Image (cartoon, grey):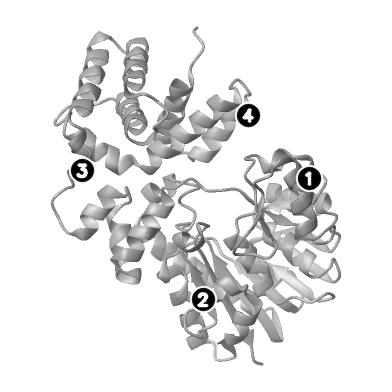
Amino acid sequence: MAHKGAREIALDVLNRVEQHKSYSNLELKHVLERGELRAPDAGLVTELVYGTIQRRLTLDEVLAHFVRGKKLQLWVRNLLRLSLYQIRYLDRIPARAAVHEAVEIAKRRGHQGIASMVNGVLRNVLRQPDVWERLPEGDAARRLAVEESHPEWLVRRWIAAYGEAATRAICASNNRPPHASVRVNTLKLTRDELLERLREEYPDAAPSPLSPHGILFPGGHAAGTRWFSEGYFTVQDESSMLVAPALAVQPGMRVLDACAAPGGKTTHLAELMQNKGEIVASDVHPHKRELIAENADRLGISIITPITSDALDLPDRGLGAFDRILLDAPCSGFGVIRRKPDLKWNKTPDDVAAIADLQYRLLERVAGMLAPGGLLVYSTCTIEPEENQSVVRRFVAEHPEFALDEALAQDLPEAAREKLDGHAGYVQVLPHHFDSDGFFIARLKRKR
């Protein structure tokens, strides 16, 4: 069999994602780990898969002008999407090359009739470049959904919560590829010292404008470097680096991380505690318990005790009271769409309601383990008010022994303080604020 090129491998991944409702990042990982692709091809496959999924609604809208009424096989539709994505969004691939490659793939996988149809559709698109500007009939939400390729129901929710201009900025930001960032392990060295070492090999490494512990890493695969294996840093998004400092931990404290895997925030807490005290790190999946232990070991951290438990069952484990609790709750993930583009197509309003209900139950259960005077941080990587502000406001209303802690501001870096919601004890970072993940962080204090 002939060697498959990057486009055909990308097509295989797109087909599997759709057929098996699997995650594109896992399917991609599987393909890339086989090691058959040279680095530039691996980069192209990644860009084609993520880009085609990100822009799916826009691509389908354009496609609809040329295939009205035709029933397309799944692989043919994905081949057309993939080719349209290259034509529209990738400057370095000549349009004619994208069309030629698509026709060759169609011949190999189908028959001459399919190849002719693919050729005809793509050449028609090239002849009518204005088709990309033909927005659908309807209101602003419908047009924005197609233009920036997000589900209409989600766009409507965000417009209601944040307004049209901010929603457009959120969607545009979601469609940009994420940049890599790392968090310095302060048990071993300072950020400036790590920057100095990194710049010998990566001269473009730069301090994060958002987190005092963060470094923007321009070299791509940070986890493949010797600095990673020697425990000098953790790969982590800049917004996520705000969570552990918000807990205001001190050396010697007893801390619970209720949904801890893979341990990025847990190890950050241990570093802030100077590796003194105790952190119980719980996760529901046994294999993820190993991941937390491995991360702690690599970083030279000894105060983390990983356990396997559903967070709802933690109060029954006889763990005692904690000075600090982190509940980084499971969520819809709408703050990380740029990393996981399938998310926006696979979720429904019912999913949001169901997860908000689970989040509330988790918060109620773990909050009872907090010692009087202690602090609890509730965080998510979503931008849905129903999962964020609504959950903590309801909790405080129904549990008078807890209050939102307005002193949160003093434990956030200056850049994030600007995003504080009045003085309500929580902050919502949106994806376009810092070109980082969307994140919500609330801090609750137990009064008695």
Q: Which mark is residue 133?
A: 3
Query: Mark 3 is on which residue type?
Result: Glu
Query: Mark 4 is on which residue type?
Result: Glu
| Up-down relation of residue 7 to residue 103 (above or below) | below
Q: Answer left or right for 444 relative to 212.
A: left
* Residue sitting at the far top: 1
Dot 4 or dot 2, earlier in sequence: 4
Q: Report x, y in % for residue 55.
A: 35, 42
Query: Mark 2 is on which residue type?
Result: Glu
Q: Which mark is residue 33?
A: 4
- Dot 3 falls on a residue whose secondary structure is helix
Q: Report x, y in % for residue 84.
A: 31, 31
Residue at horizontal 58%, vertical 22%? 37
Residue at horizontal 42%, vertical 29%? 92
Dot 2 or dot 3, earlier in sequence: 3
For mark 2, what is the residue? Answer: 418
For mark 1, what is the residue? Answer: 227
Q: CA distance from mark 1 to mark 2?
A: 33 Å
Dot 1 or dot 2, earlier in sequence: 1
| Up-down relation of residue 56 to residue 331 (above or below) | above
Q: CA distance from mark 4 to mark 2?
A: 41 Å
Task: Name the foreground residue: 270 vs 195.
Answer: 195
**Pointer 1 with pointer 3, Cβ within 8 A:** no
- Dot 1 falls on a residue whose secondary structure is helix
Task: Name the foreground residue: 194 vs 135.
Answer: 194
Residue at horizontal 45%, vertical 39%? 50
Report the mark closest to the observer, 4 or 3. 3
- Dot 4 falls on a residue whose secondary structure is helix
Q: Report x, y in % for residue 3.
A: 51, 11
**Pointer 4 with pointer 3, Cβ within 8 A:** no
